Amino acid sequence: MNAERKKKETEFGTVSYIEIQGNPRLFFLHGLGGRANNWLRLARALDAGYGIVMIDLPGHGNSTRNLPSWDIHEQVRALDGFLSDFPEEEKILVGNSYGGWIAARYALDCGRTRALILIDSAGSNQTLGEDSPERVKAFLDRVMSNYPHNDPAILGEILRINSLGVGKISEKEWKSISIPVSIIWGENDRIIPLENGKFLHSMIGGSRFRIIGGAGHTPHYTNPEEVASEIRDFVSLLLSS
């Protein structure tokens, strides 16, 4: 696996990403407080000739920290600017948690999406920012301990804006998604519980649903082989249709 760290200048600032050459190409969006490297275990497990682009979302990792706002819509605009130079007319997007919310909102607002793979995705659940101040602080402390490159002020602002419901995806919007969707969920997710995955599956007609036994909120990290198996099956069906 030859993974190369790159950067791209966009109208929104620098976007840092890790790329593995191959075909078809999949674009990976990490969760809140994470970075592109969160996907490396899954990338190694996939290793089947796929092109893989793992993005540091704005406000995270080595990407820009200067978006005009930290709401979901601004993240979608920044993602659209980043994706614009890649040749595929329609992209296959893979998102975990906050990254899944951005991926789904991108598909709804921008189109240009061939398929979605949503892993323990946010977007319709009660956000962490709506929780108690003590739990919010505990989350930020944990993230900063694991990823000290982050800016706690930016993460706090993202949580605050998310708590206002900006960009939340309604039932009507979930039901309107007609592209192929694979939903993957950790059985023991304590951040966005399994019932949320079942809800998304019931809303999105024709979606696939894979529960990863014993896994929590990041099954792509703890159970990469199982998640890779579902992605390979899903993409294989996608390419044969």
Image (tube, rainbow, N blue to C red):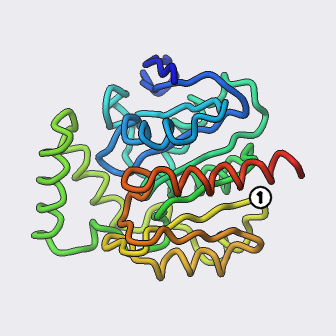
Q: Please name whichever residue, 162 or 17, is drawn nearer the observer in this view of the structure.
A: 17
Picture layout, residue 89 above or below residue 197: above
Q: Please name whichever residue, 141 or 183, is drawn nearer the observer in this view of the structure.
A: 183
The outermost residue toward the right is 241
User: Residue at image x 49%, y 65%?
Assistant: 123
Picture layout, residue 55 above or below residue 199: above
**Horizontal and vertical percent for residue 115?**
71, 51
- Which image quarter: residue 169? bottom right
User: Residue at image x 36%, y 71%?
Assistant: 189
**Horizontal and vertical percent for residue 107?**
67, 52
User: Residue at image x 73%, y 65%?
Assistant: 177
Say whether residue 106 is left or right of residue 224: right
Mark 1 residue element: loop
Say whether residue 184 is left or right of residue 122: right
**Horizontal and vertical percent for residue 41?**
42, 41
User: Mark 1 belongs to which amino acid?
Assistant: Ile
User: Residue at image x 61%, y 49%?
Assistant: 106
Count of picture labels:
1
Say whether residue 145 is left or right of residue 88: left
Q: Residues within 10 Å of mark 1 (few under 14, many from 20)?
A: some
**Horizontal and vertical percent for residue 9?**
49, 17
Disc 1: which residue: 179
Picture layout, residue 136 above or below residue 25: below
- Which image quarter: residue 88? top right
Say whether residue 209 is left or right of residue 239: left
